[in-house]
């Protein structure tokens, strides 16, 4: 990357002009956070740049460009470090884009473009886990439910230090993901460093066809308020509208009289998905407006929503961005519900993406969007109506099993049971040491890993291996989501408390 940066300025002019003559690309609306674009198609390319530059500019810049390149090739002390071919092309494009100073205008090489397009489809072949890069390698943030990663025993916080004996140290997340993914049915060897384990160990994972989970639903049944339907939306991608609508309908069919929509850490997605999902709760009024050099447009709510009169609370935090903020801003400005949590990310710009001839792509900021009341949220975010900082339980809580735990070198110690829960009725006792959950060791794991082990469909049994007074015992605890499911999540607790108020 440093080599590209070294000559980006020298190459920028020629490619800036060459781009001005490109035409006929497919184009997209885009609402995105950071480097994870989520797209929605619109019609027609923008020929503005071509009209401004003209052929004379190309002819005028070319001699200067080749003069600079000749000097660089003749005199630079390390000729092999000079980018050539596509590397030089990409350096030039990146140089032009960097000069704009806009972090949301960007370039993606073919490898990155392919990964993004695959992710946008919501389906791919691989191990099925959310990942990020850490200092020691590729970090497992969370395995998907029933995925090859989960079935192989991978846990949140595991560091993949090597893939098929190839170190991930120094890789970008895209490079690491590219070698972890592969055709369904093939085997990939992951070398794992796990907290509490003295040495790395190998795990063989058989890749599968992965459908990225979009929504998560649960029925909460507090004793002093009508049933509450909880739905978490992970993104506003291609399958989000269908799955979100189905999830809400399922909760309503189960008797939900209140709804909590959890958009925490939802990076956003398609603009039209934001409008359609918002329209499940409002059927008239402005959802957002958009203002740009070439366009001013308003987006109104659509008719046919399925939860127009259901009391609504929306959870947001600093990871709620773009389309999440469109939804939150509309719900707030239209007085449709209450926002609870922390101020959102502040992504209030709109991008188009255009495919280039070699499979790479560009995204370009073309407009800013505004809430129904005309508020610009870019780099500011949306403040909640009820501010609740997130301070998780210092010990830990297994929400699907409804027990408090404290992690240690020998396992998970039960520190609290809740009256009326499956766990309390099973015979578990405070002080019991849980050494395995569903056959997987709990030694030296933290609360996030324990929560992953304990999670599962409502009604399914969690098999707990317990040490009590030196004796091993087993308990089968049916997973359920009582009022205590919100324990250790003050923002969710605040939403439930909001519905308790007269």
Image (tube, rainbow, N blue to C red):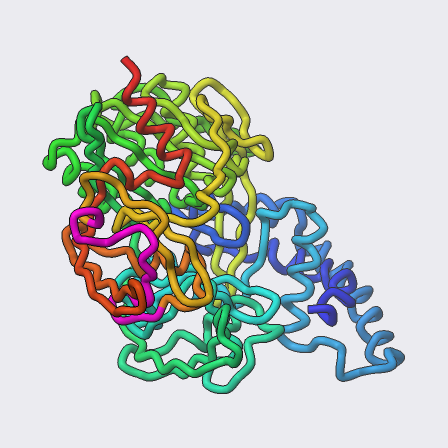
Q: 167 or 412: nearer the eye?
A: 412
Residue 89 position (above or below residue 47): below
Residue 60 position (above or below residue 298): below
- Which percent across, then down, holds residue 277? 29, 35
The residue drawn where x is 30% and y is 67% is 436
Q: 354 or 121: nearer the eye?
A: 121
- Which percent across, then down, holds residue 394? 48, 46
The residue drawn where x is 87% and y is 75% is 71
Q: Quadrant of residue 453?
A: bottom left
Q: Quadrant of residue 75?
A: bottom right
Q: 169 or 438: nearer the eye?
A: 438
**Residue lying furthest front in this view?**
469
**Residue lying furthest top in this view?**
502
> Dividing the image into 4 quarters, which one contains the N terminus?
bottom right
Residue 191 position (above or below residue 98): below
> Dividing the image into 4 quarters, which one contains the C terminus?
top left
Q: 382 or 45: nearer the eye?
A: 382
Q: Which residues are magenta?
A: 423-441
Using the rendered image of the protein, determine whether residue 336 is visible from the camera's viewpoint.
yes
- Which percent across, then down, holds residue 288? 42, 27
The residue drawn where x is 16% and y is 48% is 425
In the displayed structure, does residue 406 sit left or right of residue 250? right
| 424 in the magenta segment | yes
| 113 in the magenta segment | no
């Amino acid at each position: 990357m440093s080599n590209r940066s070294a000559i980006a300025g020298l190459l920028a002019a020629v490619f800036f002009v060459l781009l001005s003559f490109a035409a006929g690309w497919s184009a997209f609306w885009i609402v995105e956070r950071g480097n994870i674009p989520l797209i929605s198609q619109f019609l027609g390319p923008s020929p503005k740049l071509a009209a401004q530059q003209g052929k004379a500019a190309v002819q005028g810049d070319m001699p200067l460009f080749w003069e600079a390149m000749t000097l660089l090739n003749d005199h630079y002390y390390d000729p092999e470090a000079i980018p050539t071919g596509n590397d030089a092309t990409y350096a030039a494009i990146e140089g032009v884009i960097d000069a704009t100073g806009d972090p949301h205008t960007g370039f993606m090489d073919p490898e990155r473009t392919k990964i993004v397009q695959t992710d946008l489809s919501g389906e791919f072949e691989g191990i099925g886990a959310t990942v990020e890069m850490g200092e020691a390698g590729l970090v497992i943030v969370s395995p998907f439910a029933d995925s090859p990663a989960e079935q192989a025993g991978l846990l949140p916080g595991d560091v993949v230090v090597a893939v098929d004996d190839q170190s991930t140290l120094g890789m970008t997340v895209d490079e690491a993901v590219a070698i972890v993914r592969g055709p369904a049915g093939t085997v990939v060897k992951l070398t794992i460093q796990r907290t509490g384990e003295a040495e790395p160990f190998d795990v063989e994972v058989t890749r599968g066809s992965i459908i990225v989970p979009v929504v998560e639903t649960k029925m909460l049944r507090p004793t002093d308020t009508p049933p509450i339907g909880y739905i978490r939306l992970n993104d506003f991608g291609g399958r989000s509208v269908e799955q979100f609508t189905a999830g809400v309908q399922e909760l309503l069919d189960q008797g939900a009289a209140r709804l909590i929509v959890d958009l925490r850490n939802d990076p956003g997605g398609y603009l039209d998905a934001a409008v359609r999902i918002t329209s499940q709760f409002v059927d008239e009024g402005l959802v957002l407006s958009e203002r740009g050099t070439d366009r001013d447009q308003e987006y109104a709510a659509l008719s046919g929503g399925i939860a127009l009169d259901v009391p609504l609370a929306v959870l947001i935090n600093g990871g709620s961005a773009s389309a999440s903020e469109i939804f939150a801003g509309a719900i707030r400005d239209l007085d449709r519900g209450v926002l609870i949590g922390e101020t959102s990310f502040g992504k209030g710009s709109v991008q188009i993406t255009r495919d280039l001839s070699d499979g790479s792509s560009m995204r370009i900021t073309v407009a800013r969007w505004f809430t129904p009341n005309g508020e610009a949220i870019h780099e500011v975010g949306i403040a909640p109506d009820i501010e609740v900082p997130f301070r998780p339980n210092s010990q830990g809580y297994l929400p699907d099993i409804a027990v408090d735990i404290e992690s240690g070198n020998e396992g998970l110690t039960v520190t609290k049971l809740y009256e009326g829960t499956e766990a309390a009725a099973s015979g578990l006792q405070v002080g019991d040491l849980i050494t395995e959950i569903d056959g997987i060791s709990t030694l030296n794991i933290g609360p996030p890993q324990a929560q992953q082990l304990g999670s599962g469909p409502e009604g399914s049994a969690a098999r707990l291996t317990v040490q009590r007074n030196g004796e091993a015992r087993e308990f089968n605890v049916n997973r359920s989501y009582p009022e205590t499911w919100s324990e250790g999540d003050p923002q969710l607790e605040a939403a439930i408390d909001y519905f308790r108020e007269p």
